[in-house]
Amino acid sequence: MFLFQIGFLNIEWVDVLDILLVAFLLYQIYYLVRGSLASRVFLGYLLIYLFYLVVRAVGLELLTKILEYFMGVGAVALIVIFQQEIRRFLLFIGKSTAFANNRLLGRFLRQPTSTDKINEIKPIIEAVRAMASEFTGGLLIIKKNDELDKYLQTGEEVDSVLSKRLFLSLFNQYSPMNDGGVIVADGRIKAARCILPVSDSDDFGNLGFRHRAALGMSEVTDAAVIVVSEETGRISLAIEGNLLSNIPASEVEERLRKYLFEQSSKK
Ligand SMILES: Nc1ncnc2c1ncn2[C@@H]1O[C@H](COP(=O)(O)OP(=O)(O)OP(=O)(O)O)[C@@H](O)[C@H]1O
């Protein structure tokens, strides 16, 4: 259906829709790669593409051929380089669709939210408070809906009830289990010494590896991750790719309650 004309161009409704969708897609790509190393790779690729367009327009055939070949190989390389971002993008789409929020389909897509989760928070917060006051470093991952098997397998199985004392002994500086993250799932301490994916985001200043691992985990899964800094005793919380630094334990507790139960309260 004809909408309006710019010079010799006839603009139709479908063109407007097309432009809006492309703008939305580009914004999402920008949002996902923003601040990461991948954003520089993306910019580099874009500049080479612009250079290629100029070279082709000028008619430099040999250089055009070389750049064409390079861009062809580059497209495959981009998939490898942007593996994490593509994954995040697909997760974003999966999470935002009505399917994921549909009660019936939601049952197949996520684990049922157990009321035990309310009791998960108390011993965790007590442990975090004690660790912060003693400058004991810690990395605590609390499962929401996404499966964490891949990360559980990197650590040592614990499978115990939630207990403040057990958290403190796992993170104790003399414990052989204190390296890596402790994963809590379905109301139990599932594993310790777990290795988490490290974020390459530049958005949060000069982060150490413990904090980067917390952020990285929150970027690729919907788990909530608490970090206690060994250096400063500060508590931080990473959720959905955002790191809230230096917050009191009471705020962590409140945010966890809201975040872990927001879906059950929607029901
Ligand atoms: N990828 C990872 N997965 C799990 N744990 C990790 C990972 N990387 C680092 N850690 C944990 O973080 C510890 C190192 O923390 P580092 O001092 O580098 O970070 P930090 O963010 O500065 O923390 P802190 O403020 O406590 O010093 C390691 O001993 C290990 O326990």
Image (cartoon, rainbow, N blue to C red):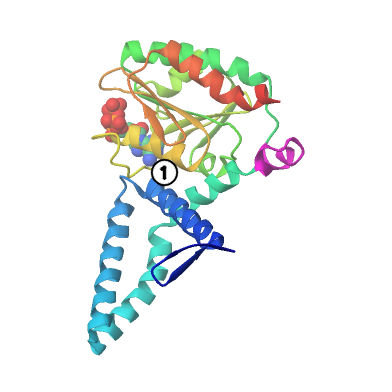
Q: In the image, is the residue at mark 1 within 8 Å of ligand 1 by its beta carbon? A: yes
Amino acid type at image mark 1: Pro
Visible residue check, residue 163: no
Task: Quarter of the image for the C terminus: give it.
Answer: top right
Q: Neighbour class for label 1 at 10 Å: few (<14), some, many (≥20)? A: some
Report which quarter residue 57 is drawn in. bottom left
Nearest to the observer: residue 57 or residue 240: 57
Q: Position of residue 147 (x, y in %)?
A: 60, 40
Report which quarter residue 100 is drawn in. top right
Specify the quarter for ligand 1.
Answer: top left
Nearest to the observer: residue 130 or residue 53: 53
Residue extending furthest right? 104
* In this view, 167 is above or below 200: above
Residue 101 is covered by the magenta coloring:
yes
- The span shown in magenta is 98-110
From the viewer's perspective, is 201 left or right of 114? Answer: left
Which type of secondary structure does the marked residue at label 1 adopt?
loop
Residue 236 is covered by the magenta coloring:
no
Q: Position of residue 56 (x, y in %)?
A: 28, 82
Pointer 1 residue: 197
Task: Quarter of the image for the N terminus: give it.
Answer: bottom right
* In this view, 96 is above or below 254: below
Q: Position of residue 132 (x, y in %)?
A: 35, 14
Report which quarter residue 216 is drawn in. top left
* In this view, 111 is above or below 137: below
Q: Position of residue 8 (x, y in %)?
A: 41, 72
